[in-house]
């Protein structure tokens, strides 16, 4: 845990911004949450925004140090690492839903990249809780829920991508 004296103030909004305030930190968390990208190479090559390797390495290091991500050896690759969401980052889901809803209303967001935000907004807190339970299963080893919100969101996204191509 970081000491209070290391921050500009003890204001909870300031503290959140100091932890997550740059755009890349939230996008890395988004990619782990919605894309299940858990390895460095996946995060680097599959990001829609094209994050630079040095920035990605720095953000991963900061997110792990801040307790937002876990880091474990990859059993399938001797030198690889698997990143996992922690409980504090999973609890960011409602904030990301609200950010997605705001972006859908006030920007020119693409339909295919908006569909997950729309479904989560429409589903409200019950859907968010179901998705967070599934994220706890995927990232923290909790019991597997019966419903796969991740699969539903992925299917809707793939359908939106296919409709754009048609």
Image (cartoon, rainbow, N blue to C red):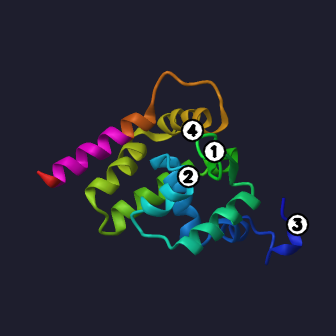
Q: Which mark is residue 145?
A: none
Q: Residue at x 33, y 56 (%)?
A: 113
For this rendering, which residue is in front, 76 or 98? 76
Q: Nearer the viewer, mark 2 or mark 1?
A: 1
Left or right of 84 in this view: 52: left
For disc 2, the neighbor class at 10 Å (few under 14, some 14 to 19, many from 20) is: some
Q: In 3D space, how far apart are the residues under numbered discs 2 and 1 (Cα atoms)? A: 9 Å
Residue stretch rendered in magenta on the structure: 154-164
Report which residue position mark 4 lands on.
135
Q: Are marks 4 and 1 in contact (CB under 8 Å)?
A: no
Left or right of 50 in this view: 22: right
Q: Are marks 3 and 1 in contact (CB under 8 Å)?
A: no
Q: Earlier in the sequence, mark 2 or mark 1?
A: 2
Q: Nearer the viewer, mark 4 or mark 1?
A: 1
Q: Earlier in the sequence, mark 2 or mark 3?
A: 3
> Which structural element holds mark 3?
loop
Q: Are marks 2 and 1 in contact (CB under 8 Å)?
A: yes
Position of residue 128 measured from the top left corner of the image (x, y, whole percent): 51, 40
Q: Nearer the viewer, mark 4 or mark 2?
A: 2
Report which residue position mark 2 lands on.
39
Q: In 3D space, how far apart are the residues under numbered discs 4 and 1 (Cα atoms)? A: 19 Å
Report which residue position mark 1 lands on.
74
For disc 3, the neighbor class at 10 Å (few under 14, some 14 to 19, many from 20) is: few
> Which structural element holds mark 1?
loop
Q: Nearer the viewer, mark 3 or mark 1?
A: 1
Q: In 3D space, how far apart are the residues under numbered discs 4 and 2 (Cα atoms)? A: 16 Å
Is residue 146 magenta-colored?
no
Q: Which mark is residue 3?
A: 3
């Amino acid at each position: 845990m970081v000491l209070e004296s290391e921050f500009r103030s003890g204001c909870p909004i300031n503290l959140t911004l100091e932890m997550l305030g740059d755009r890349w930190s939230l996008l890395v968390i988004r990619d782990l949450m919605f894309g299940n990208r858990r390895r460095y190479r996946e995060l680097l090559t599959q990001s829609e925004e094209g994050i630079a390797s040095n920035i990605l390495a720095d953000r991963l290091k900061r997110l792990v140090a801040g307790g937002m991500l876990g880091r474990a050896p990859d059993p399938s690759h001797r030198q690889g690492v698997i990143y996992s969401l922690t409980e504090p980052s999973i609890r960011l889901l409602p904030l990301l839903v609200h950010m997605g809803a705001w972006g859908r209303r006030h920007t020119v967001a693409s339909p295919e990249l908006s569909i997950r935000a729309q479904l989560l907004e429409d589903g409200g807190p019950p859907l968010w809780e179901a998705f967070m339970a599934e994220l706890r299963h995927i990232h923290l080893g909790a019991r597997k829920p019966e419903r796969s919100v991740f699969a539903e969101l992925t299917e809707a996204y793939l359908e939106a991508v296919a409709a754009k191509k048609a």
